[in-house]
């Protein structure tokens, strides 16, 4: 049995905490699941049967081991942990992207990933420094939706712009002083919605890139929280894809 | 000096953790601030001066007391705690509302409060059972924006409907199977955006109330997270208030 330790960024493996999160990886990326731990208190259920079935079919080792939960999980309601071999992704150069410039909060990153998967924008560029998307806190906050997106790190905006952000592409930096209101802006595809850091927003030079947009709000708050602003952008940019006949 | 204990729902007082959150209450609801604690490691700054000035002007006791931080705060970066006398609010019957039916998560509640304040919808109805809005976790997640909204609890939907929800009012329950798409729906004022519980959504009978709406997304996810869905609703309902000339 592999020794189990608390997650560190440099590790080659990470893990999914909880049944829902683990099931997402077992369904979407079973090739990256190396082992599944069950807690002895995990009751018989449809979910348990599904997990055992996938592990059996795929030859993924599955064991009952309560000690692992003591080491890896602080939550009482965690009964399944899936170990994941880290993998790397390439973005789809022709697709629409979300670009996160220096995102710092793991819960926010997870919520953004879930919204991206939800609105069908499945390519996420992260400009360093940025939170580690393989952090178990990110995977958990994404409800496992990390398995459904492609993500890639870049050392700078220029690196992204010259590689996967090259070609025919429409850039929309979200800035508090963006020159147009989001809801008065036609978002053309393929787009890159560009979001800044939670505390500092985007560097000023983004006002010269593409069409900077803003989401107006009252001065009761300094700014919307990052996943909220990103999700409103995704909603506005993709709502033409969802129409009643 | 009053003895300080970890927050319990039945307490008459609650507290703001952190300088930003405390400043919101000192600025917006100083009449409810009974005492301010500073950590000895709180450096000299503009914020510190402002806090001391308001406390001085308002006669709010302010003391350096590191022990209080050990008891009330688990975060390392918390240097100010404002004690708050709980208060009750009445909703504005003529204004637009957000109605939260059985909200269960304190972080989500705080994020929703912040978005409500941001989009200028300052009346929130909570149908019991629901998370305690005075929980310090809620106040902190709201970044102190709780001070800027009115909120009130109701034992049932009917109780809200027959009191503060009575009169000329347009109801929009957010449901996964809502009969209209949000972005194809004209949201009339005053509105009540009605949001269900994180895990279970709204009870089925809400499909008979007002105009049920849905936010379409791919089947990559089961549902959007609650603050995201609420904030998209707020954005869509209020964007006519924010127009360029």
Image (cartoon, coloured by chain):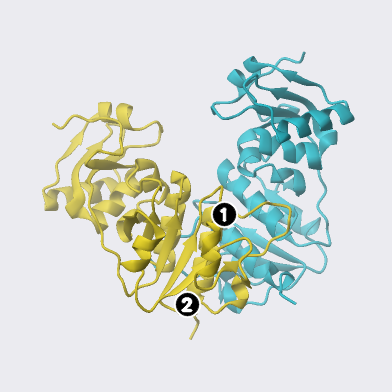
Chain colours: A yellow, B cyan
Please name whichever residue, B175 or A240, is drawn nearer the observer in this view of the structure.
Answer: A240
Residue B227 got which mark? 1
Residue B37 got which mark? none
List x then y, in percent, for residue A68: 26, 30
Disc 2 secondary structure class: loop
Disc 1 secondary structure class: helix
Does the image show residue B201? Answer: no
Q: Residue at x 83, y 56 (%)?
A: B92
Q: Is residue B236 above or below residue A168?
A: above
Q: Is residue A231 left or right of residue B60?
A: left
Please name whichever residue, A171 or B87, is drawn nearer the observer in this view of the structure.
Answer: A171
Quadrant (top left, top right, bottom left, bottom right) of the C terminus of chain B: bottom right
Does the image show residue A76? Answer: yes
Where on the picture, by quarter, is residue B227? Answer: bottom right
List x then y, in percent, for residue A11: 24, 38
Q: Residue at x 20, y 48 (%)?
A: A33
Total residue callouts = 2
Please state the chain letter of the residue tagged with numbered disc 1 in the rendered image.
Answer: B
List x then y, in percent, for residue A218: 73, 59
Please name whichever residue, B177 or B37, is drawn nearer the observer in this view of the structure.
Answer: B37
Is the residue marked by circle 2 packed among few (<14), some (14-19), or many (20+) residues within 10 Å?
A: some
Q: Residue at x 82, y 31 (%)?
A: B53
Q: Is residue B227 left or right of residue A245?
A: right
Is the residue marked by circle 1 packed among few (<14), some (14-19), or many (20+) residues within 10 Å?
A: many
Please state the chain letter of the residue tagged with numbered disc 2 in the rendered image.
Answer: A
Where on the picture, by quarter, is residue A24? Answer: bottom left
Read off the residue under disc 2.
A242
**Disc 2 from disc 1: Cα separation:** 21 Å
Quadrant (top left, top right, bottom left, bottom right) of the N terminus of chain B: top right
């Amino acid at each position: 049995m592999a020794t189990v330790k608390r997650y560190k960024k440099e590790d080659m493996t990470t893990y999914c905490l909880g049944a829902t999160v683990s099931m997402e990886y077992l369904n979407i990326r079973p090739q990256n699941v190396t082992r599944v731990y069950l807690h002895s208190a995990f009751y018989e259920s449809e979910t348990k049967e599904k997990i055992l079935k996938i592990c059996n079919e795929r030859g993924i080792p599955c064991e009952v081991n309560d000690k692992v939960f003591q080491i890896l999980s602080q939550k009482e309601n965690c009964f399944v942990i899936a170990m994941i071999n880290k993998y790397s992704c390439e973005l789809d150069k022709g697709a629409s992207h979300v670009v996160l410039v220096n995102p710092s909060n793991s819960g926010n990153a997870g919520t953004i990933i879930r919204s991206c998967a939800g609105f069908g924008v499945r390519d996420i560029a992260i400009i360093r420094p940025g939170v580690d998307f393989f952090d178990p806190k990110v995977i958990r906050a994404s409800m496992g939706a990390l398995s459904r997106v492609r993500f890639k790190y870049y050392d700078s905006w220029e690196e992204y712009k010259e590689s996967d952000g090259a070609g025919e592409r429409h850039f929309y930096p979200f800035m508090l002083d963006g020159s147009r209101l989001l809801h008065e802006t036609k978002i053309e595809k393929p787009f890159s919605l560009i979001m800044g850091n939670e505390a500092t927003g985007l560097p000023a030079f983004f006002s010269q890139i593409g069409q900077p947009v803003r989401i107006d709000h009252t001065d009761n708050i300094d700014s919307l929280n990052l996943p909220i602003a990103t999700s409103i952008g995704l909603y506005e940019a993709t709502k033409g894809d969802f129409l009643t006949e």
